[in-house]
Amino acid sequence: MTIRAAIVGPTSYTGLVLIEWLLRHPSIDITYLASQRETLPNIADDHPRLRGRCELQCQPIDAAAIAQAADVVFTCLPHVVAMEYVPALLDEDLKVIDLSADYRLADAAAYERVYGRPHADAGNLKHAVYGLPELFAADIAEAQLVANPGCYPTAATLGIAPLLQRSLVQPTGIVINAASGVTGAGRSPKPNLHFPEVNEGYVAYAPGVHRHQPEIEQTLTRVKGEAVSTLFVPHLLPVNQGILETIYLDPKDDDVSEEELFDAFDDAYGDQPFVRVRRDLPNLKYVVNTNYCDVSVRLVNAGSPQDDSDDAPGKKVVVFAAEDNMIKGASGQAIQNMNLMFGLDMATGLA
Ligand SMILES: NC(=O)c1ccc[n+]([C@@H]2O[C@H](COP(=O)([O-])OP(=O)(O)OC[C@H]3O[C@@H](n4cnc5c(N)ncnc54)[C@H](OP(=O)(O)O)[C@@H]3O)[C@@H](O)[C@H]2O)c1
């Protein structure tokens, strides 16, 4: 079987990564690259890494033409922009994998609260499936529209879900301390992302108000079946690619052991090709340029081990999760989803 793939927004960072991985996929032909630009670029001029490997001329964003050429389309567009184009692509019976945030929050009112404008495609929003393959593979396989998860939410959800499912941790008071490389912010230049601003710095942003916090809570609440609340604090890390999250949780009770925490991870991910449960601590170096999310966990004393008073702070569960923001956090995960939507092994082309 050869699947014909189109990309809308191939001049993006995630578009570049998607093209590079799709070129290695045994069942894919990239047939249509769709750009908004008035002067349509050859993709190898825009992404010189592709010279000699993919030299397709970009075409206009025309849903009917894309449907003639392709079976599946990846939309690598900013949020708000994506939902302008997705309805026409779905009307053409294309399978759509949207890498933006436009179809991730199931509730249109929640979307408006978080993104500051009404959802423009509430009809299709109802049918979108959240594309985290480790949790929702069966739904993804049946979907026409997959909302590819955010980069930070992928690592956070994979790190927390098994512990909530086993009731080993409290569903409230979860603190997610996360750091991402600069490609996470996309390719458009911004003053705070200028090299001298980022290089050798390390800074938090949007503590408790980042748009990924409600996305993380939505998935964990669904998994747990009761309200889960988090405090998400992202940081900008002066590297190109990679996310590391350190997540602090309260154990359900005093009897929880580190072995039980690892058992929950081992059971959840033993059969999953792209989540590795590590006994050592995850490191960006082990995951960058791969589709893996590495997770680990420790049960630690929050206060002094000598403090055996009644009001001693007790123990904390600390989870560590690392991934490449543009691969497991975006384009690699999108290919995992495409594989499921076309009945392929989810690891095809991603090893
Ligand atoms: N970067 C990551 O690590 C990451 C991870 C997970 C999810 N995501 C999400 O994936 C999506 C793409 O992210 P990215 O970082 O790859 O983006 P990016 O590098 O900033 O590129 C944005 C793309 O959208 C196109 N575009 C912008 N405005 C448009 C419009 N009005 N009409 C048509 N095309 C338009 C741009 O085309 P031009 O080149 O012509 O301007 C470009 O191809 C975003 O929603 C992002 O939040 C990103």
Image (tube, helix red, strand yellow):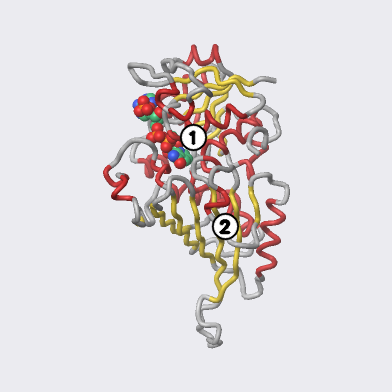
Q: Position of residue 331 (x, y in %)?
A: 53, 36
The span from disc 2 to disc 1 (Cα, nearest Å) is: 25 Å
Residue extending farthest left: 191
Question: In the rendered image, which quarter is residue 194 located in?
Answer: top left
255 w.r.t. 128: above or below = below
Mark 2 vs ligand 1: CB below 8 Å: no
Q: Position of residue 92 (x, y in %)?
A: 53, 16
Q: Is 167 placed left or right of 118 in the picture?
A: right
Q: Quadrant of the N terminus?
A: top right
Could you tell me the amino acid type at mark 2? Pro
Mark 2 lies on residue: 282
Task: Pick whichever, 257 or 325, lies toward us.
Answer: 325
| Crowding near the residue tagged with mark 2, few <14, some 14–19, many ≥20 C-alpha atoms within 10 Å | many
167 w.r.t. 63: above or below = below
Mark 1 lies on residue: 99
Q: Position of residue 90 (x, y in %)?
A: 52, 22
Question: In the rendered image, which quarter is residue 345 located in?
Answer: top right
